[in-house]
Image (spheres, helix red, strand yellow):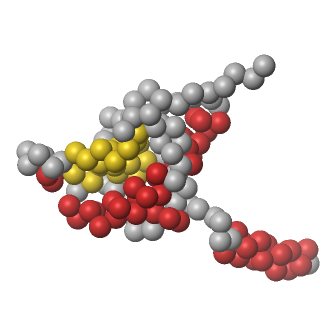
Amino acid sequence: MATKQNAPAATEAIGKTKLNPNYKRIPAYGKQFMEMRRSGKVPSKRVMVTFDWDLAQAYPRIVLADDTPADQLNFSYLAGLPVQVIYRRKDSHRVSGVIDSILQVNPSCLATFAIDLVGTGDAVTLIKAYERTHTEVAA
């Protein structure tokens, strides 16, 4: 049967995709940002990166709901955009890795906001100050 002959090839293809050392998973809502960027559009507001589904619902956001290490996630669509990581104390151990990974794609600015620290003066941290990006017009 043709199905039996194709099964090993399909299994091999799946294995190669998952074992590809350069493969990075796209977090929730990341695909929408990729499509937006491919069409030449950018969000009108700062992009929020959260660890909980109930945070930053009124903003463009991506949600890192599971414990996938940040270096295994694709953040390329955040290049040149203002980004803020919003988190609760229970996720503070993940923030450093996420910051490092996002900085690799060069956002226009990057800040963090610790919801549990509101009122203490330590809630907001500016990681990378706003930087204008210039695009060259092709002649």
Residue 38, position in %: x, y? 65, 36
Residue in view at x 47 percent, y 42 percent: 107
Q: Is residue 131 left or right of residue 1?
A: left
> 17 or 93: which is nearer to us?
93
Q: What residue is rendered at 69% in x and 22% in y?
A: 137
- The one of 22 and 15 positioned closer to us in this rendering: 22
Taking the image as shown, residue 7 lies to the left or right of residue 1, namely left
Q: Does residue 63 appear in this view?
A: yes
The quadrant where residue 44 appears: top left
Q: Is residue 108 above or below residue 116?
A: above
Percent coordinates x, y for residue 9 in the rendering: 83, 75
Return the residue nearer the eye: 3 or 91: 91
Query: Is 132 rendered above or below residue 18?
Result: above
Q: Position of residue 88 (x, y in %)?
A: 22, 56
Q: Quadrant of residue 64?
A: bottom left
Across and down, in percent, residue 58 comes to 32, 35
Q: Is residue 49 above or below residue 67?
A: above
Question: In the rendered view, would you say 16 is above or below 101?
Answer: below
Instruction: Classify the position of the N terminus by image quarter.
Output: bottom right
Q: Is residue 6 left or right of residue 49?
A: right
Q: Nearer the viewer, residue 136 or 33?
A: 136
Which residue is farthest left? 119
Quadrant in the picture for the C terminus: top right
The residue that appears at 43% across and 48% down in the rendered structure is 62
* The image quarter in which residue 21 lies: bottom right
At a point 56% along the width and 61% down the height, the residue shown is 25
